[in-house]
Structure formats: C-alpha cells, structure tokens
Image (cartoon, rainbow, N blue to C red):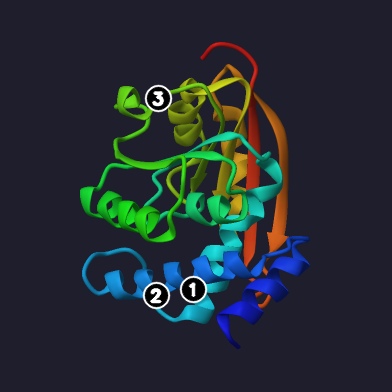
C-alpha cells in the first residue's frame, strides 16, 4: 500500500484529514529517514509503509491534545517523533525539539530545512539538566518512549506553564506501567486523562497519559 493511502486511510480512522501537501512532506521525511538510518542510529524501521504507521500515525495520536498555535516541546525527540509529524499537521504551532545526541539533532535540523518548517528549532539539550538551552513556558511538552512516567514528569513540568499539559506516550504495556507509576508522579501535576489506542493498519497498542501542571514546579 502506498504511503499516501496509508496516511490518508489511517488518519481518517483517527478522525484526521491529512491533506495532499502534508502527504508530500511525510514522503520527503520518510525518504530522508531511510537514507540517514544507514548512517546513524535513527530507527530500526526502514520500510515506508511501517514508518507511516509506527512512526507518523503513532505520533499523530497526541494531536487532539495540541491546539493550533500552541508552543510545544518534544523531549528526547530522536528522529523527530512525535514533534515533526505533529508540526506537519498543525503548522501553526511553535515547536522545540530537544535531544542530547548531536547526530540526531543534526538530522532534525536537516528535516526542518528540507520541509521548510517555520517556527521550529532543534536543540542539543537534555530536559531537566540543560533547561536554559530549551526555554520554558510551553503549552505542551511531549515525550515518546523516552523514560518512565515519573522521570518524564520531573523533567517536563518545570518547562511548561501553569495549566500546561505533559503528554507521555507509551507502548502496549502502557496501562500496566501507569498503574505502577502514577503514585510516583511529582507534586505540582494532576492526572488529567489517559487513553489506550489501537493504531490503524498495524493493530499495535498505544497508551497516552496527559498530566496538567497545577502550580509552580
């Protein structure tokens, strides 16, 4: 199945309309990801169809939590997931992609340039330790398969504004992991919502937790 069909069909199942110009950007992103994967450790997935579902559509499962024009921080962005797919479909957001690995930051900067993404920057920084390089006052911080929920929350909460949201993306065991981790979430956040989703086409299970910042942390 062509990338375009996978994106439009899977997007529709998630209630998303992925427009032709967005598909073009995803195709370029996929091509560059495959090209660069042989040079640096970006992803073990190197076929376009699986990239479309397991990376692009997976990233878009958090889109409903992100309003147009929001300021968004992607923690441990790696190859740009979920931040860049979200930016493609929400072009009005202001996006910062943070990762501690220089080669991955270089790759993300190349993607930003190739896709002509405005109000987007990639920074070499570790959230929680190098916050000065990242900034602060974000509406949303998101982390995809980076660390356990309490660690993500401790790193992310100081970087979002009061009332801001921290999104933690997990895999198939996410619901069970969250049961064990919820009591360890630091003060200053309140459990907002969680949901388990099945990715279209692949049937893979995903779990998303949303925390809201309730006071200065």
Q: Which residue is mark 2?
A: 31
- Residue 99 point in image, percent of width and height: 33, 44
The answer to the question of whether label 1 and label 2 lie on touching residues, with beta carbons closer than 8 A, is yes
Q: Is residue 101 left or right of residue 49?
A: left
Vertical order, 36 against 124 (above or below): below
Q: Quadrant of the N terminus?
A: bottom right
Q: Residue at x 46, y 27 (%)?
A: 154
Q: Nearer the viewer, mark 1 or mark 3?
A: 1
Extreme bottom residue here?
Answer: 1
Q: Quadrant of residue 197?
A: bottom right
Q: Residue at x 44, y 81 (%)?
A: 47
Does any portion of residue 175 appear in the rendered image? no
- Residue 199 point in image, percent of width and height: 66, 67
- Residue 153 point in image, percent of width and height: 51, 31
Q: CA distance from mark 3 to mark 2?
A: 31 Å
Q: How packed is label 3: few (under 14 Cα within 10 Å), some, or many (20 or more)?
A: few
Dot 2 falls on a residue whose secondary structure is helix
Q: CA distance from mark 1 to mark 2?
A: 6 Å
Q: Earlier in the sequence, mark 3 or mark 2?
A: 2
Vertical order, 58 against 77 (above or below): below
Q: CA distance from mark 1 to mark 3?
A: 31 Å
Vertical order, 76 against 9 (above or below): above
Q: Which residue is mark 3?
A: 135
Q: Which residue is mark 1?
A: 27
Dot 1 falls on a residue whose secondary structure is helix
């Amino acid at each position: 199945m062509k990338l375009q069909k996978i994106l439009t069909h899977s997007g529709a199942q998630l209630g998303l309309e992925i427009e032709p110009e967005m598909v073009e950007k995803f195709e370029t992103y996929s091509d560059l990801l495959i090209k660069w994967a042989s040079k640096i450790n970006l992803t073990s997935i190197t076929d376009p169809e699986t990239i479309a579902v397991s990376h692009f559509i997976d990233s878009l499962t958090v889109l409903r939590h992100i309003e147009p024009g929001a300021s968004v921080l992607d923690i441990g962005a790696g190859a740009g997931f979920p931040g860049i797919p979200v930016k493609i479909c929400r072009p009005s957001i202001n996006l910062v992609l943070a990762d501690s690995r220089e080669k991955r930051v270089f790759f993300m900067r190349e993607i930003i340039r190739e896709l002509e993404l405005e109000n987007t920057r990639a920074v070499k920084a570790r959230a929680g330790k190098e916050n000065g390089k990242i900034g602060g006052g974000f509406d949303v911080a998101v982390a995809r398969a980076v660390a356990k929920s309490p660690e993500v929350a401790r790193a992310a909460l100081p970087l979002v504004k009061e009332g801001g949201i921290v999104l933690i993306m997990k895999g198939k065991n996410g619901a069970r992991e969250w049961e064990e981790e919820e009591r360890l979430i630091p003060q200053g956040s309140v459990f907002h919502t969680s949901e388990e989703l099945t990715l279209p086409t692949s049937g893979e299970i995903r779990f998303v937790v949303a925390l809201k910042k309730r006071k200065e942390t």
